[in-house]
Structures are given as structure tokens and as C-alpha cells.
Image (cartoon, rainbow, N blue to C red):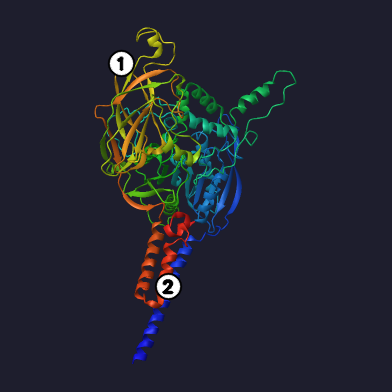
């Protein structure tokens, strides 16, 4: 009997040991599968095509558009037109086109007129030029037998693109009802408002939506960004940090003087003689590169004056989706970056409101990137695919029409910012949805004197356009405001965490002091030697979160410029400022700091010396919109992989506990050491996104 019991115990012990070993191997294989690098993707077949389109006024009768068609494995297939960013070409979006082709779409990637090997000149996404080119691409797709056709001359087609390509995406969808789905990324609504923003609010009522900023005329010239992009397209180089493709890379083929469609060359002038007329013409055209003359001349004019004139207003209106976005019938997924001082979240908000007002399905995603912060994340890319899968392939469930956004939190032990994604059932305030909750925080601070220095220098630095995510992140933390040129107002430490989502609002009081030349004249009415008006002023309003350890973070890395008019010396003027929309986590114990500065190097500022007294408005509060929503993921821990591994670990540890006799104590110790000590790489222990690549 004892011998039989001993034999049974030994058999059970061996069985438990093998079960434990097997489960442990399953866990380790799962970890290895997640951490193992993915194999190279399957190559995609392509066809290079050259498509003639109408040149338009001031161009040759016909110009050629250089394009590449990416073919899926199964044909016929729905088509997607893919447009690139400013300074890029069809090569800039090659990786994105291949990705969509592997998902079953025929993708037509093209170089916009004036870029790459395409002919013509750059008209800044004009409704009369680039938008008509895109419409001609739809015509071309209607002739291909390998594209699904919904009717004669009506291909099943979607369109997508980032920045410059995002604007033409909206324009094409607004002028051509054959478009079945649209996904614009990090683009503008009004190009005039983007390049000449003014956040001094003309209306005092509550915002309709979470990111609405009521448009105000006569804004402040965003000279640094304008110069960055004009330089990139006239010199033939893509500026580092500019987003040419959806992934945010700067891999676009450069365009330069001498490529197809560029300015003509001229015969050299005789030695010692004056240049020939052709040489002078080539010199003038060469200064504009491949930019259309009216755009080039208009830019030069406003860059010199720092003010938007009527001619440039008309030109920029014709290069704005605002003119046609309200006509869109194609379901539209709007993706906008939270780190973007060029095209802020208010532009996505304006586009969404116009599309929804037409009764069209629209969804909005804010992601942690943009012109200052890089390309889309994997979750956003998956949403883009899901949108096309439902509305184009028509073989997937309807996507969520709610609102998704990212919030950056604390710093992880790997040195990365923990960024979590939240989802709300609807975009607050859109198409009858409930608006955001508004939290008011009391501000304190006495009226403070500030000066605008002569010549506008030195100027504060809040952003470095075109230099990418690293510089943007550093400046958001390290950027400083110049003493004597800035007033600041603060809250008390917050009692609980606050998720700022959208445009905060603050009331200010501005009182001009006498200018230096007025003082020199002996009275406030002395003669002025400056041609600049004394009845207006320019300021830059910024929102910081200040941690309980004193670390200051500039919300969105952005300053909100305002131009205040109707000022009189010694007379206070009250204004309301709707700050540029942001998504920001402000932890309990932190304070909110509002800074009002007279200068910012990214903008055109007055040259005239001036002094002001800056104070809070009557309410002395800042209104904070809070969208709410549920956490759906973080960038440090992929939820699906984590849940699967937790389940496997529970099973493994359960088996080990059941079999935790002396025979497998060593196995238990070894497995525990392997999982929780440094034998595994850090990415496999904490399961960040890097281990899934």
C-alpha cells in the first residue's frame, strides 16, 4: 500500500512538473512572439503613369501630373487617392500607399503640380488649379477596369493626405460628389486664419464646440512658419520636421530650380555688359522657384508689411477648404495633431462643424503629433483603415463616430512621456451633442507694466517651426518669457486633476501708456515720428501648467496671438481671449499660469516701442473645457497584448502553485526570476509599443 501511494505521488509530481514546464514554455513563447521583430512586408506591384490635366490660366494648356498606382493582390478594388505635404512628392507617401495597397486598395499617389516631376506651378491648393487636378484623377480612375465602379464615370474612391495634401483632400470632397470617403490630416480650414491668426474673440458667448475659436479679422502674421515653407518650395528642399507623408517623415523627393516645370534658364550676359532681358526675367522668376507669380508676389508683399491685404485675402480664400467644405457628402474622418503651431486644433473643429452641418457623417481624432511633433500613431492609422474598410471596401462594421484624443501624462521610467488615449461618445457640441463641461479657476495677479521693445527685439521664443518634435518638446518645458515684456497670472494649486480639452477662455484688461516719442513731445499729445498706429497693439497669450516641483510646460507648445484695436492712452480696454485649443493633463497640486507677452519670434511684431498695463478682466478667472471620456489605451502598455499575457501568467502561476512541491521549487524560482528580473529585455518586461514592432 505504502509503495503504491509513493508511486502515485511520484507520478502526480511528475505530471505537475510537466504541466508547469509546458505552461511556462507557452508564456515564454508568447513573450518571444511579441518581442520578435516583424518580417519585411510583401512587395507591392506598381505602375508609373503620367496624366495630362488642364493647365489653367497663366499655365501651359496642358501639364503632366506624375503618379504611381499601387496595386493590391485582388482586383478590381476600391481606389484611394493619396496626396503629399508641402515640399514633398509622390515618393513622400510611398510607404503609406503600400500600406493601404496591402489592405486591398488600389492607391493612386501623385506629385501635385509644381512638385517632383509634375509640371506647372504651385498655387497653394487653389480651387482653380490643384483641386481641379485632383478631380481629373477621379476621372482617370473611372476609366480603369481594375477599379470598382459604382456607375458610369463614378469610381468608388476615397481620398487622403496630410497638411497640404489634407487641404486638397477636403477640397476634392467638397467639389466632387463621386468621392465616397475622406480622411484629411493636420490641415487647415482657412489659410488666412492659419497664417494670420487672431484669438481676440469678437463674441463673448459660449463656444459651440470644444475646439471652436470664433474668427477675428486682421490677425498677426505667422512669419516664421510662412518663411519656412516658402523657403522649402523655392529652394527645392523639404524642411526637417515638416510632414510630407502620413507617418511624418521627411523623405519626399526634393524639388529644385531646374526640375520639370521650373523657371527657364537664360543665356549668359556678355562679359562686362548689362544682363539680357531674358536673364533678368529668369532672375525674377528664379526668386519664386516653382511658386506661381501671384502667390510669390503676394507673399513678398505681406512678409514685408506684416499685414494681410485685400488681394492676399482673396487669394488665400481660394486656397481654403472653408469655401467648399460645407458641401461634402462623403463621410469624413478628421485627424489633427495636438502638437501643431501651424494648423491648430481649431481648424479641425471648423471643418468638422461645416461638414456636420451638411448632415454628413464626421468623426474627429486628435493625436499626439503634428507639424511640431511627428506622424500618426498605430491606433490612429488603424482608425483610418477602419474608416476606409467600412465606407469603401464595405466589408467592415460602421466605425465609431465619436471623439478620440491623446493626453500626455507623467514621465515613465524609460524617459518617455506616458500618453493615454481617451474616447468620448461624440465630439462635444457637434451636431447637437452635449458640450464640454466648463471648469472655472480663479486667477490672481495685479496689473503689470510691460513694454514692446523698439524693433520688436529681443523677442520671446515659444516654438521653433520646422525643427521637429525634439525641439518642440524641449521648448515647451525650457522656453522662457522675457522679463519686462510679459505679465503673468496664476491659480492656486489644483485640488484635483484636470484634463483641459479644447480652447480655454480668459478676460484681460489692456491699458496703453504714452509712447517714448509722445513723452519726448512733452505730453501725451506730442507728435509721433512713427507711421505705426498707436490705437492698436499685438500680444501673445500662453497657458502653462506648473507642477508642484516647479516644472513649467507650455500647453501645446503654442502662443495665441491677439491684435487689439481701438486703444487710447490711459484708457483700459477689456477683451476676451479664446486660447488655441490644446489637450493637457494638469495634475492635482499643479497650478495654471497665464502669460501675456508683447513679443514672439515666430510672429511679426510692431517695431515701435510701446508700454502697456496688463491686468485681469472683471471675472479674473480662466474657463477650462473638459471633454471627459474613457481611457482606451496608453502608448507605454498595449492593452490587448497586456491582457493576453496577464491571462497566461495567471494560468502559469496557478499551475506552479498547484504543483509547488519540492520537486519544482527550483522551476518556480527560475521562471519568476526570468519574468521579473533583468534576463528579459526592458521592453518585454513592461510591454511598450516598441516590442510590437
Q: Which residue was labeled with disc 2?
A: 667
Q: Can you tell which quarter of the image residue 673 is in?
A: bottom left
Residues tagged 2 and 1 counted as in contact (Cβ below 8 A): no
Residue 588, image x and y in percent?
29, 43
- What residue sits 64% from the left and 25% below the top? 283
Query: With 7 as the anchor, is 432 left or right in this view?
Result: left
Residue at left offset 59%, top offset 52%: 46
Q: Is residue 290 visible?
A: no
What is the quadrant of residue 197 in the picture?
A: top left
For the residues labelled 2 and 1, the Cα–Cα distance comes to 82 Å
Residue shown at the point (30%, 16%) measured from the top left: 570
Q: Is residue 63 visible?
A: yes
Q: Which of 154 and 32 lies nearest the eye of the viewer?
A: 32
Spot occupied by residue 463 in the image (x, y as percentages of width and height): 45, 34
Which of 12/250 is in front? 12
Choose between 659 and 263: the one closer to the eye. 659
Q: Which mark is residue 570?
A: 1
Which numbered disc flags the more N-terminal residue, 2 or 1?
1
Secondary structure category for the residue under label 2: helix
**Residue 517, x across and y down, in percent:** 41, 11
Q: Residue furthest left?
A: 619
**Horizontal and vertical percent position of residue 341:** 43, 36
Amino acid at each position: 500500500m505504502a509503495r503504491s501511494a509513493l508511486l502515485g505521488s511520484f507520478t502526480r509530481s511528475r505530471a505537475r512538473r510537466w504541466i508547469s514546464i509546458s505552461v511556462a514554455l507557452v508564456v515564454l513563447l508568447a513573450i518571444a512572439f511579441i518581442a520578435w521583430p516583424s518580417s519585411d512586408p510583401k512587395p507591392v506591384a506598381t505602375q508609373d503613369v503620367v496624366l495630362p490635366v488642364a493647365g489653367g490660366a497663366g499655365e501651359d494648356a496642358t501639364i503632366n501630373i506624375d503618379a504611381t498606382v499601387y496595386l493590391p493582390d485582388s482586383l478590381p478594388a476600391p481606389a484611394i487617392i493619396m496626396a503629399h505635404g508641402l515640399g514633398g512628392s509622390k515618393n513622400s507617401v510611398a510607404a503609406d500607399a503600400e500600406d493601404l495597397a496591402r489592405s486591398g486598395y488600389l492607391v493612386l499617389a501623385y506629385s501635385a503640380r509644381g512638385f517632383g516631376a509634375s509640371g506647372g506651378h504651385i498655387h497653394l491648393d487653389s480651387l482653380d488649379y490643384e483641386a481641379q487636378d485632383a478631380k481629373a484623377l477621379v476621372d482617370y480612375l473611372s476609366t480603369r477596369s481594375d477599379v470598382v465602379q459604382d456607375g458610369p464615370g463614378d469610381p468608388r474612391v476615397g481620398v487622403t493626405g496630410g497638411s497640404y495634401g489634407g487641404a486638397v483632400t477636403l477640397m476634392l470632397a467638397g467639389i466632387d460628389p463621386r468621392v465616397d470617403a475622406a480622411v484629411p490630416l493636420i490641415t487647415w480650414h482657412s489659410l488666412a486664419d492659419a497664417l494670420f491668426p487672431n484669438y481676440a474673440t469678437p463674441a463673448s458667448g459660449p463656444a459651440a464646440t470644444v475646439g471652436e475659436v470664433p474668427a477675428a479679422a486682421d490677425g498677426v502674421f505667422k512669419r516664421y512658419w510662412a518663411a519656412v515653407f516658402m523657403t522649402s518650395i523655392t529652394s527645392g528642399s523639404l524642411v526637417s520636421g515638416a510632414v510630407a507623408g502620413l507617418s511624418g517623415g521627411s523623405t519626399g523627393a526634393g524639388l529644385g530650380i531646374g526640375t520639370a516645370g521650373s523657371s527657364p534658364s537664360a543665356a549668359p550676359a556678355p562679359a562686362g555688359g548689362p544682363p539680357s532681358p531674358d536673364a533678368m526675367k529668369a532672375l525674377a522668376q528664379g526668386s519664386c522657384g516653382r511658386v506661381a507669380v501671384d502667390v510669390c508676389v503676394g507673399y513678398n508683399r505681406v512678409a514685408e508689411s506684416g499685414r494681410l491685404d485685400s488681394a492676399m485675402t482673396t487669394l488665400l480664400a481660394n486656397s481654403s477648404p472653408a469655401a467648399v467644405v460645407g458641401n461634402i457628402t462623403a463621410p469624413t474622418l478628421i485627424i489633427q495633431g495636438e502638437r501643431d503651431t501651424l494648423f491648430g486644433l481649431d481648424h479641425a473643429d471648423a471643418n468638422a462643424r461645416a461638414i456636420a452641418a451638411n448632415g454628413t457623417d464626421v468623426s474627429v481624432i486628435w493625436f499626439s503629433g503634428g507639424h511640431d511633433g511627428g506622424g500618426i500613431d498605430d491606433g490612429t492609422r488603424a482608425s483610418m483603415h477602419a474608416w476606409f474598410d467600412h465606407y469603401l471596401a464595405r466589408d467592415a462594421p460602421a466605425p465609431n463616430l465619436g471623439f478620440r484624443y491623446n493626453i500626455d501624462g507623467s514621465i515613465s521610467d524609460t524617459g518617455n512621456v506616458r500618453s493615454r488615449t481617451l474616447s468620448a461618445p461624440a465630439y462635444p457640441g457637434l451636431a447637437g451633442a452635449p458640450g464640454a463641461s466648463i471648469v472655472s479657476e480663479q486667477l490672481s495677479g495685479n496689473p503689470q507694466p510691460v513694454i514692446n521693445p523698439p524693433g520688436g527685439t529681443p523677442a520671446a521664443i515659444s516654438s521653433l517651426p520646422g525643427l521637429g518634435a525634439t525641439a518642440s518638446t524641449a521648448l515647451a518645458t525650457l522656453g522662457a518669457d522675457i522679463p519686462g515684456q510679459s505679465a503673468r497670472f496664476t491659480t492656486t494649486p489644483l485640488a484635483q486633476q484636470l484634463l483641459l480639452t479644447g480652447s480655454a477662455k480668459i478676460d484681460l484688461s489692456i491699458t496703453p501708456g504714452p509712447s517714448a516719442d509722445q513723452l519726448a513731445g512733452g505730453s501725451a499729445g506730442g507728435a509721433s515720428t512713427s507711421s505705426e498706429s498707436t490705437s492698436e497693439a499685438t500680444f501673445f497669450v500662453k497657458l502653462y501648467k506648473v507642477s508642484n516641483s516647479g516644472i513649467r510646460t507650455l500647453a501645446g507648445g503654442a502662443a495665441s496671438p491677439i491684435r487689439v484695436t481701438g486703444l487710447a492712452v490711459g484708457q483700459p480696454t477689456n477683451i476676451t481671449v479664446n486660447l488655441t485649443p490644446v489637450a493637457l493633463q494638469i495634475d492635482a497640486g499643479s497650478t495654471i499660469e497665464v502669460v501675456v507677452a508683447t513679443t514672439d519670434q515666430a510672429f511679426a511684431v510692431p517695431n515701435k516701442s510701446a508700454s502697456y498695463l496688463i491686468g485681469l478682466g472683471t471675472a479674473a478667472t480662466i474657463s477650462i473645457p473638459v471633454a471627459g471620456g474613457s481611457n482606451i489605451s496608453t502608448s507605454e502598455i498595449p492593452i490587448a497584448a497586456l491582457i493576453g499575457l496577464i491571462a497566461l501568467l495567471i494560468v502559469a502561476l496557478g499551475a506552479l502553485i498547484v504543483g509547488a512541491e519540492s520537486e519544482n521549487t527550483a522551476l518556480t524560482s527560475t521562471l519568476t526570476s526570468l519574468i521579473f528580473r533583468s534576463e528579459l529585455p526592458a521592453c518585454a518586461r513592461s510591454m511598450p509599443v516598441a516590442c510590437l514592432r
